[in-house]
Image (spheres, coloured by chain):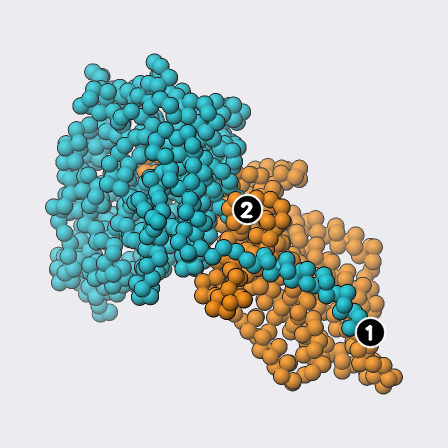
Amino acid sequence: MGRYLARRLLQMIPLVIGLSVIIFMLLAIAPGDPVDLLIFGNPKIKAEDISRLKRLYGLDQPYYIRYFKWMWAALHGDLGYSRTYKVPVLSLMWTRITNSLWLQIPAFLLALAVAIPVGIYSALRQYSSVDYAATFFTFFGVSIPAFWFAIMMIYVVAVWHPWTAVPFLNWINLPAGGFSTPGIGEGLPKYLDRLRYAFLPTIVLSLLFMASYTRYTRSSMLEVVRQDYVRTARAKGLRERVVINRHALKNAMIPLATIVALSIPGLFAGAPLTETVFGWPGVGRLLVEATLGGDFAVAQGIIIFLAALVIVFNLVADISYAMLDPRIRYD
Amino acid sequence: MRKWRWLSLPLALVMTIGLSALVGAGPAGPAAGPNTVVIYTQQEPSCLQPMPDACQMFVGTMVAVNFLRDGVLYDQNWKYFSDMMEKLPSLKDGDWKVLPNNKMEVTWKIKRGNTWHDGKPVTAQDWIWAWRVNLHPDFPTAGRDVAQRVESITAPNPYTLVVKWKSKYAFANHSVAGSSILPKHITERMFRANPGKFEQAAWGNGVPTVGNGPYVLKEWQKGSSITLEAYPKWTGEKPTVQRIVFRFISDTNTIIANVLSGAADATDETAIPFVQGLELETRLQREGRRDFVMEAKPGLVWEHIDLNNDNVHLKDKRVRQALIYAINREELVQQLFQGKQAVSHSWLPEKHYGYNKNVKKYGFDQARARALLAEAGYTPGSDGIMQKGGQKLSLTFMTTAGNRTREQVQQVLQAQWRQVGVEVRISNQPARVYFGDTLPNRQYEMAMYAWVFGPESDCEGLYTGDTIPGPGGTGEGQNYPAYKNEEVTRICHAVPAELDDARRTQMLQRMQEIWVEDLPVIPLYLRSDYVGHKPGLQQFLPTGAGMPITWNSPRWRWSR
C-alpha cells in the first residue's frame, strides 16, 4: 500500500502541472481581455493609453512568459490578485470557500442523515408505500433543476409564507436571499443571523444530495441483503437488527463511501446556481463571476484548486475502498 | 427509552437555537425602519475609487456619490449644480475666460467648511492631487481624455482652483479637471508606494474609506452588502435618512422576491432588466398592490444595429435605407415593450441638448424598401431572396448571447427582412467575445448592441472617419460601422471645442441630418430602465441619465 500511495502521489504532480497549463491557456486565449472591455466603454481612448494599460496589466507579454510568472508566484503561495475584488486571490478564495462550506457541510450531513436510514428502510421494505414514496422523492430530487427549486423555495417560504395565517407559526420569517443582515455585529447574533440566511439554500442543496444518496443506499442494500452470508446470519437466529447492522450494512456502505469521497471536492466547489439565486457569496458564484468578468487570476486559482482536490480525493476514494473491503489490495 | 432520555435535553437545545434563528423582522413599510433605506442591485462595485477604470461600474458610482463629492452633479432635469463649490463657472460671469492663444482659464471657488470624514478640511490640493494621479503613466485608467486637455491647475489659496486648459473645451465647468477628487492626506502615501496598484489600496476597498460626502462608508460585507451612515458634519442639506444599505443579489428573480416580500425599499436601474420590470409592473397592477412602484425611466441607452459599411451589400446607402424601411419599429416597441421604450430616429436621445427633432423619419414601408433594393440593382431569386451579380443578399445578424430581449427583437426583424427578400442569419456571441473581439475588429455584418450616452455626449470617436478600428482601419476609436463622411468628421472633431451653446447645438443637428440620410447604423429605440421604490420613500427622483438614483439621497424621507 505504501508503494502504491507513493506512486499515486508522484503521478499527481505532472497531472496538476498539465492541468494548470491547459486551464491557463484556455483562459488566456479566450477573446476579450480586461483592457479590450475597458476600451469598449470609452470612445475617446488613445492608442498610447491602450498600450500603457496592457503593459500595466501584463497583457502585452507572450502567453508562456505570463504562465511561468504565474507558476513561479503560485509555487511561492501567491496566486495573484483579483482584478475585481482588489484582494489576493488566496484570501478571496479562502473567504468564499468558507462561505460555501457554511451551506455545503450542513446540507451534506443532513443528506446523509436522511438518505442512509431512508435508503436502508426502503431496501428492507421493498415495494412498500415507504419505498414508493422514497423512490418518487429520489426521482424528483435528481430531476428538478436546482435553480428552479431554489426560486420556488424563495417564493413559497419568503414571499408567500402561507403559514403566517397560523398564529403559533407566524413568527417564522425567512429572508429571500442574501448573506447576513447589515449591522448585525459580532458573536452569537451574527451566527444566528447567518443560520437564518443559510436555512433555505441548505435545504435546496441537501435535497439534491439526499436524492442521489438515497438511491445509492437502497440499490446497494438490496444487493447485499440477497447475499448468502446474510441468509446464513438469519439462519443462525441472529436478530434482524444485528444481521443488518453487523453483516449487511458495512458491505452496503462500500459503494456509498466511494461516492461520498468523490463528492467532497464538490463541497469546496460551491454551488454556482444555488449561490447565485440566493445571493450567497460562495466560491461557486465567485467562479462564474470571475469567468464572465475576465478576472483570470481568480478563475484560474479556483479551477486549479478544484482540479487538485478532485485528484486528491480520487486517491482517498481508492484508499477508503481498500480499507472497507479487505479483499482489495494495492501494491 | 433510556437512550432517548439523555438525548432529549441536547435535542431540545438544538431545536430552540435552530428555531429561534428563524425569527426575523417582517417589514411592512420601510424594510429596516424609518431611518433606513434598503436598495437592491445586481452588481457589487469592485472598488469605490472614483477614477481607476476597474472600479468604474455604474453601481460603484451609485454608492460612491453618497460619500464622495467631487464638485459637480446634475439633477433629474439634467441641470448641472455643485454642492462643493460656491457656483459653477461660466463665460458670462467671467470666471471662465478664453485666452488669446485659444487656451482657457476656469476659476473654481470651493465652499468653506466642508471636511473629510476624519475632520480634515477639503481644499484645492485634493482636486489637484487627483488630477496628478489620473495623469500618472502607471495609473491604470483609460478615462483621462478630459484630464489630458488640462495644462495646469494651481491654487492661489486653499479654497480657489485655477484650471488652465490647453484648448477650448465646451464642458470645462462640468468637472474640475476631468479627474474627481481624492483625500491627499490619506492617499498620497498609498499612491506613491505603488501607483500601478493604487486601485488595490485600502482606500476605496473597504472600511475605512474616508470621503467628504453626506454619508460615511460604515460597513462593507464583500459579496453581500454596503452600509452608509449619515455624516453629521455635512454642510449641505442634512440627510433625513440616516442609513442607506445596498444589497447585492445577482439573480433577478431573487430581487423580485425581495421586492414582493417587502425587503427592498428601492431597486436601481441594473436590478431588474426591462422585460422583467415590465412583467413585475403588470403583476403589481393586476394584483392591486400599491406597496411598490415600478417606473420605466427613459434613459440614454441607445439600442441600435451597426451596419458594417465595408460589406459588399451594406456599402450602398440604398440597401441600408431599405433595411430600415422594411422593419416596423413602432410595432416592435408596442408589442415587446408596451410602448415604454421610444423608437429612436437619430443617435442622440430627445432629451439631449443637441437632438435634432427635424431629421428624416424612416417609417415602415416595405414597398419603398423593395423599390430601393431594385434601384440598387437587386432582383429576387427563385427562393425570394434578393441577389445582385450572383450574390445573395444574405447577412449575419449578431448580438449578445443570452439576452432574451435582444433575441426576441432579432426574431421579429429577421421575419420582416425576409418579407422584402433579405436573408438574415442570426449568430450570437457571449458579451466578452462580442465586445472584446468581434466589434473592435469589425468581424460582423450587422451588430446589435447599445451605447450609453451622457448629457455631454458627442460623435467624436464614434462617427469620425479617422477613428475606424481594426484591420484596415484608420485609427483607434469606436467607429465600428466604418462610416466615412468628411463633413461629419469635421463637425464631430469641432463640437467639443465649441463654447457657444447655440452654435454647438446647430453643429450637432447638422451632423444628425447628414447621418440620418447616410444611415450607417439602424437606430432602434431608446432603452428605458426600470427603477422601483416604495411609494412612502419621498424625493426619490431617478434622472434616467447616467447620474445614479442616489444623487439626491440627503433629501430622501419616509412619509408618515
Q: Residue at x 33, y 19 (%)?
A: B161
Which tint was used for chain B? Answer: cyan
Image x and y of residue A142, in percent? 57, 70
> Residue B56, relative to residue B134: is it above or below?
below
Residue A246 numbered mark, or none: 1
- Residue, far right: A236
Which chain's residue wears label 1? A
Q: Residue at x 56, y 59 (%)?
A: B22
Which tint was used for chain A? Answer: orange
Which chain's residue wears label 2? A
**Residue type for callout 1:** Arg
Q: How many marks?
A: 2
Q: Left or right: where does residue B546 sit relative to residue A262?
A: left
Image-quadrant location for residue A325? bottom right
> Residue B191, relative to residue A239: is it above or below?
above
- Of the pair A174 and B371, the residue shown nearer to us: A174
Circle 2 residue: A184
Image x and y of residue A117, in percent? 70, 73
Image x and y of residue B323, in percent? 21, 57
Residue A252 in sight: yes
Q: Which quadrant holds the N terminus of chain B?
A: bottom right
- Residue, far top: B156
Tell me the SS state at disc 1: helix
